[in-house]
Amino acid sequence: MKYMFASDIHGSAYYCRKLLEAYRQSGAERLILLGDLLYHGPRNDLPKEYAPKEVIAMLNEMKQEIVTVRGNCEAEVDQMVLEFPVLADYAVLVLNGLTFFATHGHVFHQEHMPPVKAGDILVHGHTHLLKAEKAGDNYVLNPGSVSIPKGGNPATYGILEEQTFRILDFDGAVVKEICLK
């Protein structure tokens, strides 16, 4: 099975459209969103085509295919307008025989690991910096940011196919890849 991971849309209708187009073209089974869907946050500039109401409409159309966790910019009011759960602090997902601890990254991250077993995978967003690496007995993944990438990175998302995690830009180029075995 194929799964798409993305984080930090931050209310950008432009990048939400690009993400959903890439999702549809990828053939992924589910879209796993790692938080910060609607609001840009006080530390970030407005992303391109900042239009949270348009993002709400686009994501609600996909509600049966979305799994998400709460970012540090999500609030209870967001749950009032989104038709899928957005307030879980984390999700434990078993995908393609691999166990993922999915969270936003503002609480649990590589320097503050959640309680995971050896071989489990921490996947998060928040930093807007892409990452795919082995960390001790675990793997740490960050698909980067859909709308406000940092560190000179392009806007990116991740694809899990079998046991390979690829981070791609919106031109379809693989930016980083790791085998999770």
Image: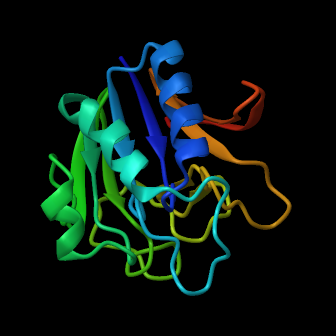
Is 27 rendered above or below residue 69? Answer: above
In the displayed image of the protein, which residue is found farthest to the right? 152
Instruction: Residue 43: name its quadrant.
Output: bottom right
Give x and y (percent) for residue 33.
Answer: 38, 48
Give x and y (percent) for residue 13.
Answer: 53, 46
The quarter of the picture where the N terminus appears is top left
Instruction: Residue 87: name its quadrant.
Output: bottom left
Please tell me which residue lies in front, 100 or 46.
46
Is 105 rendered above or below residue 4? Answer: below
Seen at 37% across and 37% down, the residue is: 58
Q: Is residue 119 visible?
A: no
Give x and y (percent) for residue 37.
Answer: 41, 58
Q: Is residue 38 visible?
A: yes
Give x and y (percent) for residue 68.
Answer: 28, 51
Q: In the figure, is residue 73 to the left or right of 8?
A: left
Please tell me which residue lies in front, 134 or 151.
151
